[in-house]
Each structure stands twice: as structure tokens, then as C-alpha cells.
Amino acid sequence: MTDESIWIFAIYIIDLMIAVAAVTSGWLWYKASRRRVQRVYRSEVLDAADINRIVTSINRTQILNARAAMATAIAAGLGILRYAVSYSNGSS
């Protein structure tokens, strides 16, 4: 393999990693948006189990959102790396 073909292969691998990170990010945010907190009515008396259920649901959603944000940051970083590799080699 020539040096140019190695650079082109590296760019294709980085492009694939960007796509995987972007799809992962979207899937995690979709999964976080599907979790619903059960509605609490005025007439209900909240006990420890109800509060625990609400807090657990909020925490799970926050964890999924944090993972999705990390996947988005990874995709952005890989995009920057792709452009750096592409422009350092002189191809696009």
C-alpha cells in the first residue's frame, strides 16, 4: 500500500467512526426521551416509594443524556480529526 492509499483508508475509517458515534448519540437521546415519569395527582399522598420512583426515573434520563452528549462530542472530535488528516495529506 502506498502512503496515499493509507491516508485514504484512514479517512474512510474515521468517517465510519463519525457515523457510528452520531447514530449512537441519536439512539441514546431517543431512548432518554422515551422514559416517562408517571403523573402524580393532587389527591395522591406521596410516600418514599413514589419519590424514589420519580428520582430514579430522572437519574436514568440524566445518565442517558450525558452518554448521548459524550457520543456527540466524540463525533465532533472525530470530525475535526478527519479534516486534520484530510488537509494534512492534501486530499479531501
Image (spheres, rainbow, N blue to C red):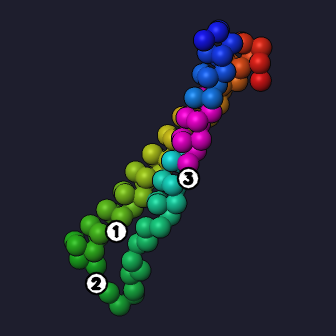
Numbered tag placed on residue 18 in the rendering: none
Task: Label 1: state its secondary structure.
Answer: helix
Q: Earlier in the sequence, mark 1 or mark 2?
A: 2
Tell me where residue 53 sits by quadrant.
Answer: bottom left
Q: Earlier in the sequence, mark 3 or mark 1?
A: 3
Figure quadrant of the C terminus:
top right
Q: Residues within 10 Å of mark 1 (few under 14, many from 20)?
A: some
Numbered tag placed on residue 54 in the rendering: 1
Q: Are marks 1 and 2 in contact (CB under 8 Å)?
A: no
- x then y, percent, for residue 59: 36, 57
- The span shown in magenta is 14-23
Q: Residues within 10 Å of mark 2 (few under 14, many from 20)?
A: few
- x then y, percent, for residue 52: 26, 67
- The residue pinned by badge 3 equals 26
- Taking 10 as reference, is 24 left or right? left
In the rendered image, the residue lying farthest to the front is 1
Numbered tag placed on residue 45 in the rendering: 2
Front residue of this view, candidates 43 and 9: 9
